[in-house]
Image: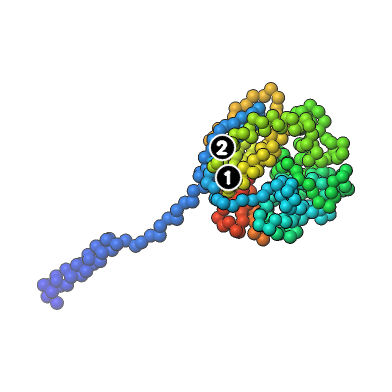
Amino acid sequence: MTLSMRTKTASFIALVFGAAFVLGAEKPPSQPAAPAKETPPAAKLKLTGPYTHENLTIYLIHGEDKLKGKTFLTLGEALKEKKAVVHETQQVNELSIENLCPNEEVFVLAGDIVRGGKQDRIIANDVIVPAKSGKMPIASFCVERGRWTRRGSENEAAFAVSANNSGTKDLKLAVRKEMVQGKVWENVNKAQAALSANVSAPVRDARSATSLELTLENKNVKDAVDAYLKKLQPVLDGQNDVVGYAFAINGVINSADVFAAHSLFQKLWPTLLKSTAVEAVAEMKKDQKFKPVTVEIVTAFLADAEKGKQSAKDVTKRVRCIEQETKGNLLYRCTDDQHPGVDLRRNYLKK
């Protein structure tokens, strides 16, 4: 091959490789797009407040109504109106509930107390009871140690309405986290002792000294609680986008609740606030001053709980409870297969 031919061949090869380089540079290999980060639920909420009475500070939580047009009966409404029955089963940790309504569903709140039967009980999980449900099992714990007979003229085969929910965070944790009957009794006793000390009067009822329900209906306890209700219950008036609340006692964040619908939260507000006020009375530290928690502290509490590792359990065929836990906080999410992607209730607890 002549020098001239070798030169032309080299030039051609260089041209081919150069073109390939240029083409490669113009169109680099495509890379998959990074998945969009989902906004944490807490970041979508707005807080207003603080609203304070004595040692209790509340923030209202505003958010989107995710169940527009959907309504539920509360357990209290359903029992009072005789639209549902909670039956005694002779088993301490399981009752049965029956929704008699042809078209209304009942939302049962974890911590709801039912009175009567063989002994007063507290409901363990958030539950939706569908219309015409028939008898459904519902998990419970005893909040009246020792009694196993009719109390006065009450019905020992079924339960009457109660306006009370669990009352203290320690009791909520015993029911929802520890799930041990002995711990429930221990925290009922603890709550009774704290309430007695802070209202400066006995709060155990002669009809059944171990009954949390009767203690919560004690006149001295009710008078102390009513002072909180009179001050704080009206803060919800006229606010149609409130879906929950967070609260602190003695300047320390305690718990929060967020619901999927304003209408559901509005119905449950009196019961939830009463339970919160009971704890404030039990935890009262007389003559001690405190600073109300800030919005930033509440927001950080909600955001941390949402980062927790998840575990789930089926409560019914359609309702699931998802627990998320971090070092300092817990979150319980109630989900429903008939409302995919929606948490009906988010219950945040400081450990």
Q: Mark 2 or 1, which is nearer the eye?
A: 2
Q: In this view, does 301 lie above or below 134?
A: above
Mark 2 or 1, nearer chain start: 2
Q: Position of residue 141 (x, y in %)?
A: 77, 48
Q: Position of residue 304 (x, y in %)?
A: 57, 43
Number of marks drawn: 2
Of the 4 image quadrants, the one containing the N terminus is bottom left
How crowded pointer 1 is (Cα within 10 Å; few <14, some 14-19, many 20+) is rated as many
Of the 4 image quadrants, the one containing the C terminus is top right
Which residue is the extreme one toward the bottom?
1
Which of the colour schemes (rainbow, by chain, secondary structure, one colour) is used?
A: rainbow
Res 209 label: none
How crowded pointer 2 is (Cα within 10 Å; few <14, some 14-19, many 20+) is rated as few
The residue closer to the viewer here, 280 or 103, is 103
Q: Residue at x 22, y 65 (%)?
A: 18
Q: Position of residue 194 (x, y in %)?
A: 76, 32
Residue under circle 2? 238
Q: Position of residue 218 (x, y in %)?
A: 79, 34
- In the picture, measured across the screen, residue 63 lies left or right of residue 107, that is left
The residue closer to the viewer here, 233 or 308, is 233
**Residue 266 visible in the displayed image:** yes
- In the picture, measured across the screen, residue 307 lies left or right of residue 202, that is left
Q: Which residue is drawn at 79% across and 45% down?
A: 115
Residue under circle 1? 262
Specify the amino acid type for callout 1.
His
The span from disc 2 to disc 1 (Cα, nearest Å) is 12 Å
Specify the amino acid type for callout 2.
Gly
Q: Which residue is drawn at 72% across and 56% down?
A: 100
Secondary structure under the numbered disc 1 in the rendered image: helix
